[in-house]
Amino acid sequence: MIIQDLLLKEDTIVAISTALKNAPIGIIRISGNKSFDIISQIFKPKNKKKINFNKGYRIYYGYIINDNNEIIDEVLVSIFRKPYSYTGEDMVEISAHGNIIILNKIVELIKSKGARLAKGGEFTLRAVLNQKMDLTQAFAIKDIIEANTEKQLEIAFKNLNGKLSNKINEIKEKLIYWIPWIEALVDFPEEDIPPIDYNLFINDLISIKQSIIRMLQNYEKLKIYKEGIDTVIIGKPNVGKSTFFNYLYGQERVITSDIPGTTRDIISEYINFNGFLLKIYDTAGFRKTQDKIEEIGIQKALQIIKNAKLVFFLTEINSIDLNDKELLSNLNENQYLIIIINKIDKIESKDLNKAIENNTSLIKEILYNLNIKNYKIIFASIKENINLDQINKAITEFFETNENLEDNFYITDIFQKELLQEVLNYLDKAIFEYQNNNPVELILVNLRLALEKILNLLGTDITELVINNMLNRFCIGK
Ligand SMILES: Nc1nc2c(ncn2[C@@H]2O[C@H](COP(=O)(O)OP(=O)(O)OP(=O)(O)O)[C@@H](O)[C@H]2O)c(=O)[nH]1
Ligand SMILES: [Mg+2]
């Protein structure tokens, strides 16, 4: 199918919009000029009351019937008249029983009456083409569907409400203020056009640049929320790493035992920690070993440690030694380190304070010698649930101090990121041409290109690039 056909929106499209597995209810959507015609051919109302297509927002109860008058399912049919629908076109939603065989049968029937299967994101593409929303909002809808955490949802809803759109429109307005002015000066030099204050102009470009740079930085921060923050649990054998992994995961995911060297391979899971996503790795205990398999596990662990942003270093109270030191020497200064000195339940309470004091100074000395400055030390018993709240607090603090996202607008997709980078590029070029006293035309060319990318971002200007990004990234039925 060529892009032009998609832009014309002449076809009526159909798709299953709910998950493609059996469920209590499944919804099929139809959008386009033939929607009403098609539904009137395949739907038989239960109470003989015909669908009144002059009225939208109505729901009818009845049966989907095939050409042999056989009932395929008992359904509810909702009618949306253009432009008051998701796509801005005439639309029908059929709520059927959520059985995939039934849903596919209904879709086939609808196709036989002249609709074609929608491409992924095509309903939303039509919504953008019909100006029901702009492209930043379309991507927000995708983000809402795909969000894994509360934080992502919060940002997606802000974007849906137009926060990102407002920001991008601000940039657009600034460019639209200068471009025609400069054009006029170039095209009609003999006319009496007021001269441009180039200081103001350049300042404007610089302020646009700054806000774009901020958006690009936020994109990187946000990635952590989307993809999860790489978190690793390390320590000597038998100190309780896997027990801690299971605690964070919320169930017995990995084997724990009192035999040192229990975990040999790397195990990872995503966990949602109070709205933040962690990608957490359990690793093999670190020690000198003759066991080949164990050694491979240790080498793998050292690789994982390099990439981790958040590190849980576990050790056992009264067992801190040179192995701990050697393992800690693999960390780098960009990592946030939470040291858990585990198994304090093994110490009699009368000796505990003294032990904490001794172990604290031991570990601090090691950290000092390794020049590690940022860390938290927590004495705990994971098995006996002692001081786990302190661990939770330390994780929360990590997110709060490191990845604060205070803005109200965010780009969330690589497609948006790449477009903004291009805008930045053209603005730099425009500034460069000005600073080198080059002809104004050269400034203008770059400003026009920057504006073009901004219009792509908003979906005002729908190019092949925009369409491909929507069709590839969105799921079918949305
Ligand atoms: N007393 C006590 N025992 C604990 C505590 N946490 C874990 N354990 C026990 O310590 C033993 C080792 O725990 P694991 O979680 O398997 O230790 P690990 O660090 O994953 O060990 P490897 O995989 O061999 O490196 C198990 O018997 C646990 O039940 C604790 O807080 N107190
Ligand atoms: Mg283990």
Image: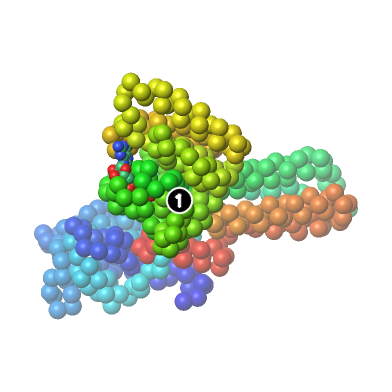
Can see residue 161? no
Instruction: Provide the residue designation for mark 1.
Output: 287
- Report ligand 1 position as a quadrant: top left
Image spot of residue 87 (x, y percent): 40, 58
- Establish if 375 lies above or below 285: above
Image spot of residue 119 (x, y percent): 41, 68
Of the 4 image quadrants, the one containing the C terminus is: bottom left
Going 79% across and 50% down the picture, which residue do you hit?
A: 431
Image spot of residue 335 (x, y percent): 54, 43
**What's the amino acid at mark 1?**
Arg
Answer yes or no: disc 1 within 8 Å of ligand 1: no
Q: Dot 1: few (<14), some (14–19), or many (≥20) neighbours within 10 Å?
A: some
Going 42% across and 37% down the picture, which residue do you hit?
A: 319
- Establish if 448 lies above or below 244: below
Give the camera-side residue of 282 and 136: 282
Image spot of residue 197 (x, y percent): 82, 41
